[in-house]
Image: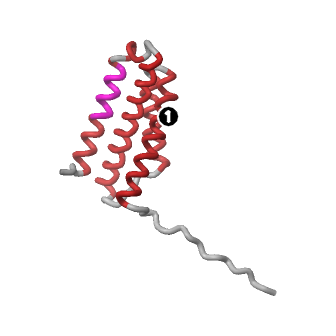
Amino acid sequence: MAASNGTSFLLSLLIALLLFASMQLFRTHISASQPMTIAGGFMGSLVFVSLLTAVSNFEMNMFGPNFQARVFPEVLTCLFISMICCAFVHRVCVTTCIIFSLIALYYINRISTTSYGNTMGSTTGYAIQKKQK
């Protein structure tokens, strides 16, 4: 059974906070080796996905069920916050966080498009006919 927008907002915000807290708790272990810094970037991308879900559900709760998150400001803000979370751990985590977050964003967009279709509408323009003299 699916959760409501308010419940999903709270759960995804809690998950993002728990991921950030665990990254801070295990900061020395994450920055100790190269594979762990990559894992830290992956955890940062999970923070990004959780924050994006929280922001989107909050906006859907406030502005109606048809409201959609856009690239600016929602996606970029969540990406920037997750990058800051990774920067507290290690600078390589920031780079891998960006890579994993963009991959996750691609798949989120792909799943959304197949589930809900293209809701932005048609962008076909009308051909402008030149006046013939």
75 to 39, vertically: above or below = below
Q: Quadrant of residue 53?
A: top left
Q: Quadrant of residue 32?
A: top left
Q: Quadrant of the C terminus?
A: bottom right
Residue at (47%, 47%) from the top-left corner?
Answer: 73
132 to 16, vertically: above or below = below
| x then y, percent, for residue 105 | 44, 44
| x then y, percent, for residue 18 | 29, 29
What is the basis of the colouring in this image? secondary structure
Crowd class of label 1 (few under 14; some 14 to 19; many from 20; radius 10 Å): many
Farthest-out residue, right: 133
- Boundaries of the magenta span: 15-24
Farthest-out residue, bottom: 133
Residue at (45%, 52%) from the top-left corner?
Answer: 70
Asked whether, in this view, residue 17 is left or right of residue 82, the answer is left
The amino acid type found where label 1 is placed reads Ile
Question: So how many labels did they put on this image?
Answer: 1
| x then y, percent, for residue 99 | 50, 34
Farthest-out residue, left: 1
**Residue 132 is covered by the magenta coloring:** no
Foreground of the two, 80 or 121: 121
Residue at (42%, 46%) from the top-left corner?
Answer: 107
35 to 55, vertically: above or below = above
**Element class at badge 1:** helix
For disc 1, the marked residue is 98
Residue at (38%, 29%) from the top-left corner?
Answer: 43
Magenta stretch: dominant secondary structure: helix
